[in-house]
Image (cartoon, helix red, strand yellow):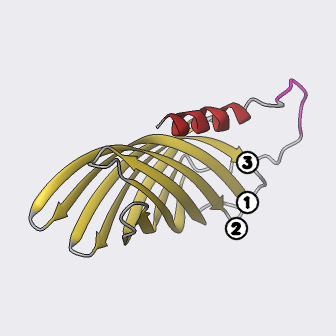
């Protein structure tokens, strides 16, 4: 868990590295920026200790309370594996980086809650998640785009579960 916190602090600090008071020329995207984004897609996740793979649909909503500094994402994923169904919910705090007019990158960290059902038994598990988010907006008005989000999860269940996953799909900008 300390490694995740250290990594988050390092990524967050990159946002202030090299910033000066000089004016820089950037494309004006204020009119094209949606106030919120819905992510609709699928997710695959692999447990690093048990080597089991699960997958299912994923839905998330994100918004920007502090432009160029903070984005907040609320997400839900339902995944299935051999005899196990799981709902996981996360709240990620992300630092956005604009790479170009069509490409964005974000690094985020936050809590995660999972509800797993196995053989009629239910387990509630809290954990943390670290995610990298790549967004591609091919259209000028940013109505639709695509995303890919690799993530690392660390949970408090027995044996401190760790998993690596990917989610990806369609972005829908809300203006």
Q: 89 or 59, which is in the foreground? A: 89
Using the rendered image of the protein, determine whether residue 144 is visible from the camera's viewpoint.
no
Q: Which disc, if any, is residue 98?
A: 3
Q: Which disc, if any, is residue 71?
A: none
Residue range highlighted in magenta = 19-24
Q: CA distance from mark 3 to mark 2?
A: 14 Å
- Residue 81 screen position, x and y as percent: 29, 73
- Label 3 or label 2, whichever comes before in sequence order: 3
Q: 3 or 109, which is in the foreground? A: 3
- Residue 66 screen position, x and y as percent: 59, 32
Disc 2 target residue: 138
- Residue 172 screen position, x and y as percent: 52, 62
Check residue 23 for magenta coloring: yes
- Residue 121 screen position, x and y as percent: 10, 60
Label 1: element kind = loop
Label 3: element kind = strand
**Which residue is rendered at x = 70% and y = 67% of the image?**
138
How many C-alpha atoms fall within 10 Å of the one at disc 2: few (<14), some, or many (≥20)?
A: some
Q: Main secondary structure of the magenta part?
A: loop
Disc 1 target residue: 102
**Which residue is rendered at x = 73% and y = 48% of the image?**
98
Q: CA distance from mark 1 to mark 3?
A: 9 Å
Find residue 111 and report its image quarter.
top left
């Amino acid at each position: 868990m300390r490694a995740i916190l250290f990594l988050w602090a390092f990524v967050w600090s990159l946002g202030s590295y090299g910033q000066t008071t000089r004016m820089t020329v950037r494309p004006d995207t204020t009119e094209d920026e949606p106030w919120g984004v819905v992510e609709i897609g699928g997710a695959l996740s692999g447990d690093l200790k048990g080597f089991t793979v699960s997958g299912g649909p994923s839905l998330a909503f994100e918004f920007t309370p502090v432009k160029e500094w903070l984005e907040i994402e609320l997400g839900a994923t339902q995944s299935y594996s051999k005899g196990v169904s799981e709902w996981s919910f996360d709240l990620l705090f992300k630092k956005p980086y604009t790479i170009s007019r069509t490409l964005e990158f974000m690094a985020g960290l936050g809590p995660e809650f999972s509800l797993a059902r196995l053989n009629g038994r239910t387990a509630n598990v809290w954990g943390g998640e670290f995610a990298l988010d790549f967004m591609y907006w091919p259209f000028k008005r940013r109505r639709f785009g695509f995303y890919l989000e690799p993530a690392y999860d660390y949970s408090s269940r027995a044996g401190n579960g760790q998993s690596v996953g990917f989610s990806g799909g369609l972005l829908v900008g809300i203006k």
